[in-house]
Amino acid sequence: MDSIFERYSQSSSYDEMFDAEKNIRPHWEKLKSNLERIGLEQLLVKQKEIDWRLEDNGVTYNVYNDPGGFNRPWKLDPIPLIIEEEQWNLVEEGLKQRCRLFNLLLQDIYGEQKAIQEGIIPMEVIYAHGGFMREMHGMKMPLTIYAADMARGPDGKIWVVNDRTQAPSGLGYSIENRLTMNGAMPDMFEGISVKRLYDFFETFKSIFQGEGSGRHSETLNVLLSPGPHNETYFEHAYLSSFLGLTLVQGQDLLAKNGAVWLKSLKGLRRVDTILRRVDESYCDPLELRQDSQLGVAGLVQSIRAGGVEMLNPLGSGVLENLGLNPFMSHLARYFLDEELILPQIATWWCGQSKEKEFVLDNLERLIIKTIDRLGEKHTYIGKQLSKKELKSLRQEILDQPHRYVGQEEVEFASCPTLVKESIEPRKAVIRAYTIVQDDRYTVMPGALVRVGAGNDSLVVSNQFGGSSKDLWVLGESQSIPPTPLFHSKTAAENSLENIPSLRAENLFWLGRYLMRSIITARMIRTTLKYMTNASRYDQVSNHQTLEMLTKALTHVTMTYPGFLDEENTPSAFDEIASVSFNATRVGSLAQIITMLSNANTYAKSILPLEASRIYERMNREWNQFCSEATANPRLMIHNLDQLLMQLMAYKELIQESLFVDQGSLLYEIGARIERSQLLISKARALLTPAHDELSEYEILETLLSTCESLNAYRARYRSSYEMRNIIEFLLLDINFPKSLISEVDGLMKILPQLPKFKNATYLSRYEEPIFEVFSMLRLSKIDTLCSLGANEYIRSELDSLLSELSAKLLLASSELSKTYFAHYDE
């Protein structure tokens, strides 16, 4: 049988699996044997299973500026990268040394600055770097999490490529990679001892549990995320759950009285520790970037006051400084009296005359980088630049030499990777992690491995189409899934009162926008159906009914002037198309679905995966439908039917799976308020005006249809449509679940369950108007509501009642928002 590696042709001077004579390296022999036994055909099946498992777990990675990039599935190669224990021990010591060095350097940079004063490093390297923050001078700056990007060089040694110190990403993906490999490919581990990740993550968790740090069990620790649009948001949600942290965004936090507080449903709760995943310059719009909407105003002052601990501290990004590379050996001798264990890529800082001249003389064969990652572009591959681009780059270096470094172009080692239907070599970069607790340094015995998209890729990144691998460090412990991490007593707090206000607000608006989408789509569909049927008959009643329906559509969607513009009456179909497709028009179905998409995105981390899949499919098909903007009413009706089926499936999945501690009450409150408001709008538009007998019959039937209440009405009354019966049925019948009073009754039962006034003996500000709405409906007299005075063309009592009810519902929604989302009273 042919070997699955028979056609494997290494593309680098060094290959992880084979030596130059294509002999298998000893520590790869067992894995190669396992792969040969599995075979290429079965390996492809395993790849599909891996893809399925990752998709099923919702593992995604957002690729910026890519049409299909949002929530792109995470890619994991079935062939791991293997490192033998002896070599990893050296790497581990090198990472610990580098982390110790950076810790001392960070304290010095924001403290006495002896390294600058004694000429170990030029001051421009520090002060010109975008990560240096004068605001943090004099602060204690412990580096808790350190990551290093490494690659094997042509000499077979592992080199440091980059240092990541402010908010290293990838830990969550490395956990998921290991869990997926354990589940999908247990036979790959056969006969191979792989060091497990469990102990590392238990140590990481203990940092937040407070073991040995004096913390208590009531501490509140949060993970600060930029939000769902960040490239690694999946990891933020995953890691927060894994470590028992509350996932928050800047809007969830309040800096006040020298401390940081979480805005939760119960009120303000003091935050002890923030695990930061927001770039430091965006963390405080008051003292740092004023245009930031991701941070917390006053956060820096709270840190200065010692009111909150930040991991990693603000200002630690200064260590992600390529300008430091040429001086790292001097710094190691100065601070540690040691030589660097791990080599790094040869780097020349252009702030020195001799080094600058060398870089300028060798632009075409070097890789030029800025010392930080600010700006749109910070890496230039000399050999890929045109003469014009080289000239421009030369001038930039001459203008600001201290901002640039030149680096030797190093060919990273390749490793076997499954590409389509063959195994091919791909260059790999390893991101390894070190954590610090009480001066103890712990290195994860594994890493996140990223492989290039192409054979000749010089940039290895998920943003450029790369994939990932699991790193197996050979050792005595057998690899097991680190599932025990989930049983910790510090598991993320999920009680209703601890839900962050931003999440609660998004669930509230998810309920409102979902109901608004469904009801608006039904209203448009019903109007279109009547319009296409009425076009076959030229009767006065048909025209009157259509006029009432189209005006009702304008009132319900609030797309004024719409069909109410008598001087400039639009074409019926053109106006309906605009109300359907025009995403820039406030109140249109397209605009409502856009708002629903935003709410869905923010709530996605707590919704079932099936709901996300249905929503993404619905959104994809809806966007295609909008782009085609058909002029065929019947096709529009068909597409609206499809949209409604998907929206209803999405709604049912949410209602079945979302439980109280996740915020289902907020979702239901939003849904009930929206249904009530839109029912009032339809009733005011269609029930308050007087109609002739034939038109009234058609209007009432259509109204019941838009409310999905036709069958229920027929079962109840077994008669033709009468105004009195329908007003009573839709507004006053407490036994009919879709009636207005039934919706309000549901609100009265739900609202007392909210935390702040759960055991109160009085009504809250948001309960009062709901109680008044219920009382007004219960006290209403059906004869009074149905009456038409002499020469009156409108049921004024009904109209007045509905107007007042709408205002009170709006007041209740506003008071609820002030109490639980904005915390104005605190």
Image (cartoon, rainbow, N blue to C red):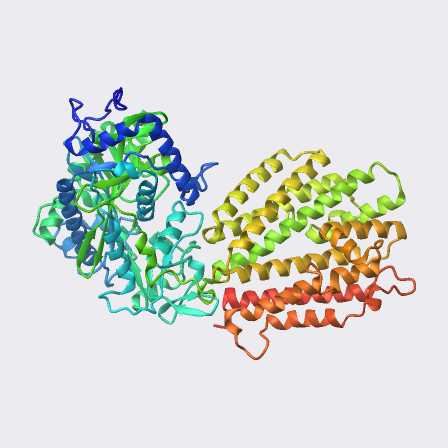
Q: Is residue 651 left or right of residue 186?
A: right
Q: Is residue 742 left or right of residue 656?
A: right
Q: Quadrant of residue 414?
A: top left
Q: Is residue 22 left or right of residue 130?
A: left
Question: Residue 117 placed where, x, y %?
Answer: 14, 55
What residue appears at the point 62 percent right and 42 percent down from the top-left corner?
A: 643
Question: Residue 606 placed where, x, y %?
Answer: 46, 54
What residue appears at the point 26 percent right and 31 percent down from the top-left corner?
A: 427
Question: Residue 170 placed where, x, y %?
Answer: 32, 46
Residue in the foreground of this view, choosing between 629 and 324? 629
**Measured along the vertical axis of the image, is residue 443 above or below residue 370?**
below
Residue in the foreground of this view, choosing between 198 and 252? 198
What residue appears at the point 78 percent right and 41 percent down from the top-left corner?
A: 531
User: Can I make out residue 590 in this image?
Assistant: yes
Q: Quadrant of residue 143?
A: bottom left
Q: Quadrant of residue 582?
A: top right
Question: Residue 484 placed where, x, y %?
Answer: 31, 55
